[in-house]
Image (cartoon, grey):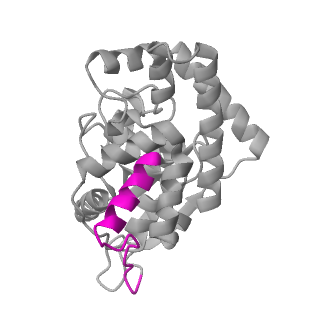
Amino acid sequence: MPEMNSPTSKPKLLVVVGPTASGKTALSISLAQAFNGEVINSDSRLFYRGVDIGTAKPSEEDLAAVPHHLIDFLEPEDPFGLADYLDSVREIAAKVMTRRALPVLAGGAGQYVWGFLEGWNVPRVAPNAELRAELEGVAQDEGIEAVFARLEELDPEAAERIDSRNVRRVIRAIEVAQAGGNTGPRRAEETPYDALIIGLKLGRERLYARIDARIDGMLMAGWVDEVRQMVQRGVPTNAPAMTGIGYRELAGYLAGERTYSDAVHATRRATRNLARHQGNWF
């Protein structure tokens, strides 16, 4: 591995990206062990405490193998957007480098990874609770398609970048656009890092088989009970921690709004859609 922090070169780092269930966690840990690295998480669902099973959060053994950052540091209802992430990851990466260690950025959130690598300057717009409640109501009554259509009218460029199925990010983009902000992040003129990007790609059938096996394993490990505990704690289904795939679906089952079979089927379908979207992004 080349010298990490030569004064004449850009800071070096490794990046592991790919769709869900492709093996990013295992590879990032192996690379960190091999090259004196520290893993920096870029999967927003792993930020939150209490959602461990359904997010495939690294095990205690994994976390002990190498230093990890940005995992289990937020409460379920804490807001933490792209701008917050970029501020945090830049600070953490700089500290890792001062220890002459190698930052290993790992995750499937394309905006978070590319925002960091390309030095995005993301607009900061305060949350609008009234607008969010209105749009969440539209999503529930008319579907996410109706909310996404509003974004397409307000900011077509943002609509092209954002996953139309991610209601939280669609609503946030509308929030920024209506506040008069530019949802398009400003990129640095030059990429600030010398990054080796490792992209994982599996054939569709093999990836879908891995997704199904992982969901089965999560359910056997107590995923429904995990969701039940969150609901009993009073965590609303629109809380950031509950917006991960499967949590709302299983919460709907626990509330008697859908059958168990339907909740599991919807979770499988949404996870496959996410994997396709991630593959297209990367």
> Eyeballing the image, is 133 above or below 233?
below
Please indicate whether residue 83 sits to the left or right of residue 51 in the image: left
Residue 199 sits in quarter: bottom right
Q: Is residue 174 magenta?
A: yes
Please indicate whether residue 100 sits to the left or right of residue 30 in the image: left
Question: What is the magenta range?
Answer: 167-190
Identify the residue at horizontal 47%, vertical 19% (top origin).
Answer: 223
Residue 273 sits in quarter: top right
**Residue 245 at x, y = what percent?**
50, 35
> Eyeballing the image, is 224 above or below 12?
above
Tell me, yes or no, if residue 69 can be seen here. no
Identify the residue at horizontal 42%, vertical 13% (top origin).
Answer: 225
**Residue 56 at x, y = what percent?**
48, 32
Identify the residue at horizontal 55%, vertical 53% (top origin).
Answer: 164
Between 76 and 149, the residue placed more toward the observer is: 149
Please indicate whether residue 18 sits to the left or right of residue 140 in the image: right
